[in-house]
Image (tube, rainbow, N blue to C red):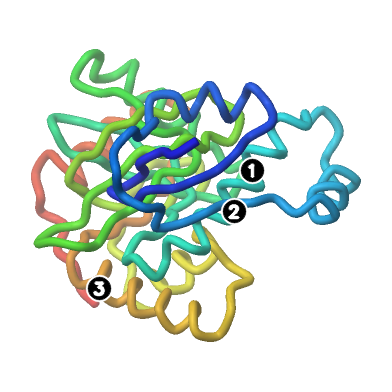
Amino acid sequence: MKVKIAGLIVELDPKYEETKKLAAPFLYDGDREADITLKIDGEYFKDLCSRAAEGVTTEELENFAFSTQFNRRAIRFQTMLVHSSAIVCDGKAYLFSADSGVGKSFHTRLWLKAFGNRVHILNDDKPVVRLSGDEPVVCGTPFDGGSGIALNESFPLGAIVFIERGDRNSVRVPKTKEIIQRLYFQTARMVSAATADKMLDNFTLLISMTKFYVLTCNTDISAAYTAYDAIIGNNSYEQNN
């Protein structure tokens, strides 16, 4: 099958229903040749299954394998994974990024409670940012990390917010060095030297076009209001890189 992800034509042949279902909204029936072709090597997939955590299904692993390939190969097209829960608020996308287990999905669900139908989740784990054009655009992908939330939508990027857990809610603006370090751990890794150079170019371009914040937060709904006030509400937090 062919799908269109972030403007790229991607060819893949999933065996399991999980990826087929998630890919359905992205199906492409035009005449463009594939920009990226994804194929899962049998030995690689066998090894991936042998190392999987308890409870992870074969279908989820196939989706993960396809997403890993796509996210590495998309780098040369100025498209990059930001491991995050992506929400849309008032027509812009905001990425809340953190290591697995920190609570990025929990936090974005606080936004749903706080702001109702002004907000929806675009992708709960693996959105990508396309950097071609005048402004970065957040694009949904058929890769979801197990949540089932993977919409075929695109919105201008409002900001990227790195989440830390803490007792009190606060927001600060990170320096460029910290942004690069955090981005590195939340994007596609284990790439070739040439791809790594391109990835750093993407980082530089993204940083020049985007606002970044670090949100320290607890699990109370007030965390959503604190984040909103800082990144959308009063716009008083200046970037200082």
Q: Name above or below for residue 141 compared with residue 9.
A: above
Amino acid at pointer 1 = Phe
| Residues at circles 3 and 1 in contact by the CB criterion of under 8 Å | no
Circle 3: is it few (<14), some (14-19), or many (20+) Cα within 10 Å?
some
Helix, strand or loop at mark 3: helix
Q: Earlier in the sequence, mark 3 or mark 1?
A: 1
Would you say the residues marked 1 and 2 are in contact, meaning their CB atoms lie under 8 Å apart?
yes
- Sequence-wise, the earlier of marks 3 and 2 is 2
Q: Which residue occupies the extreme front position in the image?
A: 31
Contact between marks 3 and 2 (CB within 8 A): the answer is no
Residue 185 image offset from top left, x and y in percent:
55, 64
Q: Residue at x 44, y 39 (%)?
A: 2
Please say whether residue 22 is visible from this viewpoint. Answer: yes
Name the residue located 25 percent from the left edge and 23 percent from the top edge.
119
User: Residue 84, located in which quarter of the rendered image?
Assistant: top left
**SS at mark 2 in the image:** helix
Q: Percent position (x, y) of residue 54? A: 86, 33
Q: Secondary structure at mark 1?
A: helix
Residue beneath disc 3: 205
Residue 98 vertical placement versus 87 (above, below): below
Does the image show residue 223? Answer: no
Q: Which residue is mark 2?
A: 68
Residue situated in front as seen by the camera: 75 or 8: 8
Identity of the amino acid at label 2?
Answer: Thr
Q: Is residue 51 left or right of residue 202?
A: right
**Residue identifier under label 1:** 64
Please, what is the three-letter code of the amino acid marked with disc 3? Leu
Near-viewer residue (161 or 126): 126
Q: 113 left or right of 103? A: left
Image depth: mark 3 or mark 1 in front: 1
Q: Residue at x 59, y 53 (%)?
A: 68
In the displayed structure, 99 sits above or below 240; it is above
